[in-house]
Image (cartoon, rainbow, N blue to C red):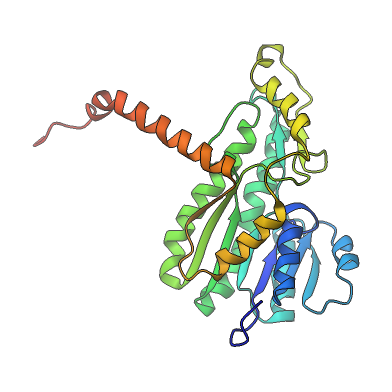
Amino acid sequence: MTSATQDPRVWFITGAARGIGLRIVEAALAQGDAVVATSRDAGSLRERFAGNASLLAVSLDVTDEAQAAAGVAAALGRFGRIDVLVNNAGFGLLGAVEEASADEVRRLYETNVFGLLNVTRAVLPSMRERRGGHVINISSVGGYRSGPGFGVYCSTKFAVEGISEALHGELAPLGVRVTVVEPGYFRTEFLDQRSLSVSPRVIADYAGTAGQVRERAAQISQKQLGDPKRLAQAMLALVASPTPPLRLPLGTDTLGAIADKNAYVAAETDAWRALSASTDFPLGE
C-alpha cells in the first residue's frame, strides 16, 4: 500500500482497457494510487471501475495529437499532476518484412511510435515544471532483438528504445526519470486478433522463417509463460525505486534473449575487429 506519509501517485496509462495496461491500472488502484486510464473507447473502463473516484477514464486515440493534449488537460484538471506516464498503447504486426504493405507499416508506426510521441510531448511540460515524474515506455523483447516474422513490429520497438535512451539523457537533469520496459511473452491478448495484425500477403519463399513464426504465434496464444498480474506488481516496484533503471527486462525469455544477443554481438565484433578498426585515419594525420 502507499505509505501514509506519501501522497498517492497519479498514473496516466494508455492502452488501458485490456492486457498489460488493464493489469497495471488494477494494481495501481489497489495500492491507493489515482489513475487516468485511456483507450480508444473508454466505455469499458467506465463500466468496470464505475464509482471509483480514484479513476478517470478518458477516450484517447494516441494517433491524434489533439486528443492527447485534451486527455492530459483532463488529467491535470482532475488530479493536478501526473507522476507516472505509461506509454502502453500499441499492437503487433506478424509477417515477413516483404509481406507487409506500406499501409500496414504506416498504421503500425502511427500508433507504436508517433502515438507514443504525441502523448509524451503532451505530458512532459507539466513534469518539467514540477521537476519530477517517471516516463515508462513499454517496449518488448523485440525492442532488443528482432527476428523473422516480427521485423516491422520490432522496428517500432527499436524506435521506442532509441527515443527512451535520448529522453533519459535529456530529462535526468530535470528530475524526470525514464525507463523502457521490455516484456517477453505474457499471457494477454497480444497474439489475438484484437491486438495482432497479420499481413494477408503470404510469400512461399518465407515459409521456413516468417511462416513458421505465424504458425507458432497461433499455437502459443494464451499459453505464454509470463503472468501479467506479476508484471503489474513489477511496475509498482519500478516506480517505487529511488534509482529506477533505464531498461527493465521482464520475463525469463527476455533475459535469455538479451544474453544470447549480447554474446552474438560480442563474438561478431571480435571476429571483425581488425576491419572495423582499419577505417580510421592513421594517428597523426
Q: Residue furthest left?
A: 284
With respect to residue 96, does 82 lie above or below?
below
Q: Position of residue 20 (x, y in %)?
A: 72, 54
Q: Position of residue 74 (x, y in %)?
A: 75, 74
- Identify which residue, 263 or 207, lies in the foreground: 263
Q: Quadrant of the N terminus?
A: bottom right
Task: Indicate left or right for 56 with 3 as reference.
Answer: right
Q: Residue furthest top?
A: 205
Outermost residue, bottom direction? 5
Q: Quadrant of residue 64?
A: bottom right
Let me know if residue 217 appears in the view: yes
250 and 42: which one is in front?
250
Which residue is drawn at the image coordinates 60% and 37% (left, top)? 154
The answer to whether residue 261 is left or right of residue 49 is left
- How far across and how far down the image is residue 255, in percent? 52, 43
Answer with left or right where residue 230 lies relative to residue 263: right
Q: Which residue appears at 24% of the width and 28% of the height? A: 279
Relative to 26, is 222 above or below? above
Q: Quadrant of the C terminus?
A: top left
- Residue displayed at 64% across by 76% down: 9
- Residue 66 visible in the current orientation: no
The front one of 285 and 10 is 10
Indicate the position of residue 51 as horizontal and vertical percent values: 88, 77
Residue found at x 50% / y 66%: 177
Total number of numbered discs in the rendering:
0
The quarter of the picture where residue 95 lies is top right
- In the image, residue 121 sits, relative to residue 80, either above or below, namely above
50 and 279: which is toward the camera: 50
